[in-house]
Each structure stands twice: as structure tokens, then as C-alpha cells.
Amino acid sequence: MTFSVASQQDPAFEPWLERQLSHSASAMLASISPVSLVKHRPGFGQTLRPLVGAVVASPVLGNYDPDPDYFFHWFRDSAVVIDALRLLYVERRIGDEALRHLRDFTRFSLALNGLDGRAVAAVQGRRARVAPELLQYLREDHDLARIHGDAVVAETRVNPDGTLDILRWARPQHDGPPLRALALLRWAAAGHLDAALLAEVTPLIRFDIDFTLRHWREPSYDIWEEELGHHYYTLRVAGAALAEGAAWLEGLGDTAQAQRCREASRAVLGLLDGYWVDEGVDDLDSTRGYYRSRVLADDRPSPKALDIAVILSAIHSLGTEAAHGPADPRMQATLARLDALFDAAYPINHGRAAGRGAAMGRYAGDVYCSGGAYYFSTLGAAEFCFRAAAMGDDARHWLERGDAYLATVRAYTPDSGDLSEQFDQRSGAQTSAKQLAWSHAAFISCASARRIAGAACQAPRGR
């Protein structure tokens, strides 16, 4: 890209960006089909050998020592990774290996639909193999027994060997299927799939669209797996998957299901309009407020109402509509509120160097691990800005803001290029899961959005 805001101030910025992109590509690929790894959970009597097609959230084996155990195939995280894999392929940073990964991922995902928790619950002596001090983390038989059919893909995560997770966790979670549908629809739309691979991908797309159509109205746990309710992020990606799915189904000749998806998508967007918190201004077009992230099942107010998940929804569900996307002034106002929140809350943001944006976290009062800044949050804010630059009028402003967030990521990324989940809000040291696949995928998609924004800004604009 010849247009660059950051490189005008620091000529080392563009070379760093290229090096980091190369490292993030390699690091993310290490999480796809990590069949050489073996994970032991001796306290639970488990030895896990990943199957081809599984995507682990982190290939670095942790056991809450202090790094958390992220050796699971999360439905959400894996969809984000597979979408970033597409970008690497389209931009020719990876060859036909990407298509092989896509085929393996598709087959692994379809096989998961046949899991049945009733068989797991019926195993004699299941609890006897678990260390007594760990029984408190083991799922009850009745909880496992309800996991079959649609409930499997609402499980949040499974083991990478294709078995059900036997640990207590926040379930159900409904963002995985629409995210996976969006990722696969983008692969299909790119025109890079031959007839055989497209035939394999199609049933999985249809399953995810159908699941989303059946369940989008139901409460589920949020993106952070903490609160049960109705969530902006989950609804937004569901609405996008239904809209994109409607166009895809129309192309297949399934006009009746396409119409049902189209109507549901419109209903979702209408519902999301009600998530706007207008702070004392009567004008319906006011930007003095923010989109709240959730409505809890019992209607309790949540201190997590202002949440980076809203911004992530705008980039994960990016489509042609302007509402609830990076060009939406209300979404931009939400980012401004989040920026102010973390700018004030995190010591590493105080007195930061010129040209750096705020390190971004999840929500106010976060206490998970260091409760600090997240790479994918800060990269998500940067990508949002680049998407806004490509779609709006004030391109230079948004490019500068995006580069400022990227400069902060650069400041807290070691020379190795490794990216964990968090970096501490006081010291900036990396914390939580090491080599998080989502962090690297976020860097890949952010860099891609930056190139698109640069090209759009250089292109002549009509009146």
C-alpha cells in the first residue's frame, strides 16, 4: 500500500507490519489441525489427540498454571480463524494448503453434529475416574444427556479430538453457527472452490443458516461466556448470516427458505435498533449514546453494557448495509465511549507516546486473568477504523485512528511477534493464553482492512 499515515511518521512501521503479518499467519496455522500435539488432563482421566480439521484456541498447552487451558475447538474462535485463512489465501500468502484446511475443517464440523451426550452420560464409572478435588468442575449426567441434535453446536466448545467437553461451562452459546456460516459463505463467494469442495461446504452452510433461523430469538450466553440473555453481538452476526444466507439460498433456488431468512434478518436489525442508549437527547439521529451489549434474561441492568463486543460485531458481520456497521454514526459513537473508558481505566494508557491509541479491553471492571487489554480488542478497534475509512468520507481521520491503535499493538508485541490473549493494563506484559489463534487472526483481518482502506482512499471518487 503506498498510502500510509503511520509510515509518514515512522518509516519502520510498514516493515514491522509485514513481519508481524507473516508471523501471525504462521502462528495461526499452528492452531489448525494440530495433530502432533497431545493434551493430558490427568485429573479428568483424559488424553486428547486432535483430529484433522480441528482448530484449537491456543496450541500452547496450559493448565491454569497460570496460563488457562484453551486446548478446545471453540465454535466461535474457529470460525474467526477460518475466515482469516481465506484472507491469507486470497492475498496469496498461502497456497492450496488453505483449501485442504477448509475441507478438513468442514468434515470435522459436520462430524460433530453426530455427537450424543446421552452416550457419554451412560458410561459406567465416569465420575470415578475424576480426581475428587476436580469433581466440582465435572458436568452432571443430566446436563450431558441433553446434548444431541442442535444442542451440539450450541455447546460453545468441544474437545479437538471430536468429543464433547465434559467440563462445566457457560452453555448454550449461539454465535458459533452464524459466524461459521458467514466465514463459509465468504469462501464460497470468492470463487476459489472447485465443485467437489463446494459440494462438501454446502451442507454445513445450510445447517448453520437453518440453526440460526431456528434459534436466533432464544437467550444464550454472551461472547465472553459469562451472562445469559440477549446479546448485541450474537444478534448482529445472526442477522448478517441470515441476510447473506438468504441471497445464497435464492441462488440455489430455495426461495421459500430465503424469504424466511430475509424476514428474520430484518427483524433482527429492527430489534438491535432498540439497543441504542440515548443519553438525554430527543433527536432520533443523536450520536450522544452507545449501543448496549446485552439485555439479560431477568432484565437486570448489567455493568457490562458498554462492551467491545459491539465493535467486534461490526467487523465480524461486515456486509453491504450501513446500519450497525463501521459507517453507522451510532457505532462510531460507541467506539468513542469505549475508547474513553479504557483510556481512563488502564494505567498503560496514561501519558502514552504520541501517535498511539488507547489499549482496549472488553468492558469496565473486567477481572479475568489480568483484566487487561486484549490484542483482539485493540486490533478490532483498528479494523473498525479502517473499515470506516473505506466506507465513509473522513478517510484520513479514520486511517489515522486505525494506525494509532496498531501502533499500540506494536508497542506491546515482542520482537518474536507472539501474541497472547491479553497484555497487562499496568505493565503491558503478555498474560492469559499464549499464541491465541484469535489474536493472530485479528491481526490478519486488521491488516487486510488497512490495505482495502488505503486502496479506497487512493481511488478517484465520484460526485
Image (cartoon, grey):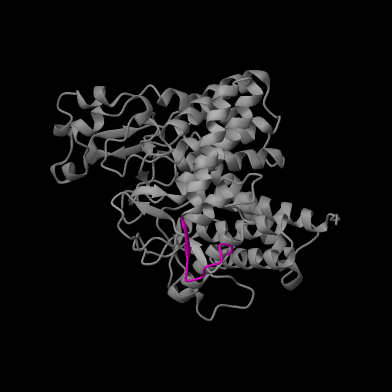
Q: Residue at x 17, y 33 (%)?
A: 129
From the viewer's side, name the closer residue of 393 and 119.
Answer: 393
Q: Where on the picture, by quarter, is residue 328?
A: bottom right
Q: Residue at x 67, y 26 (%)?
A: 193
From the viewer's side, name the closer residue of 152 and 391.
Answer: 391
Q: Is residue 329 above or below residue 204?
A: below
Q: Is residue 333 magenta?
A: no
Q: Position of residue 457 (x, y in %)?
A: 78, 58
Q: Which residues are magenta?
A: 275-285
* Horizontal side, residue 211 vs residue 124: left or right: right
From the viewer's side, name the closer residue of 460 and 161.
Answer: 460
Q: Is residue 455 above or below residue 208?
A: below
Query: What is the quadrant of the C terminus in the image?
Result: bottom right
Q: Position of residue 3 (x, y in %)?
A: 79, 61
Q: Residue furthest front?
A: 282
Q: Residue at x 48, y 74 (%)?
A: 348
Query: What is the quadrant of the N terminus in the image?
Result: bottom right
Whether residue 44 can be seen here: yes
Q: Position of residue 25 (x, y in %)?
A: 60, 46
The overriding secondary structure of the stretch rendered in magenta is loop
* Horizontal side, residue 439 vs residue 164: left or right: right
Whether residue 52 can be seen here: no
Q: Where on the picture, by quarter, is residue 9?
A: bottom right
Q: Position of residue 118 (x, y in %)?
A: 25, 24
From the viewer's side, name the closer residue of 367 and 435.
Answer: 367
Q: Is residue 276 magenta?
A: yes
* Horizontal side, residue 248 vs residue 115: left or right: right
Q: Residue at x 44, y 44 (%)?
A: 57
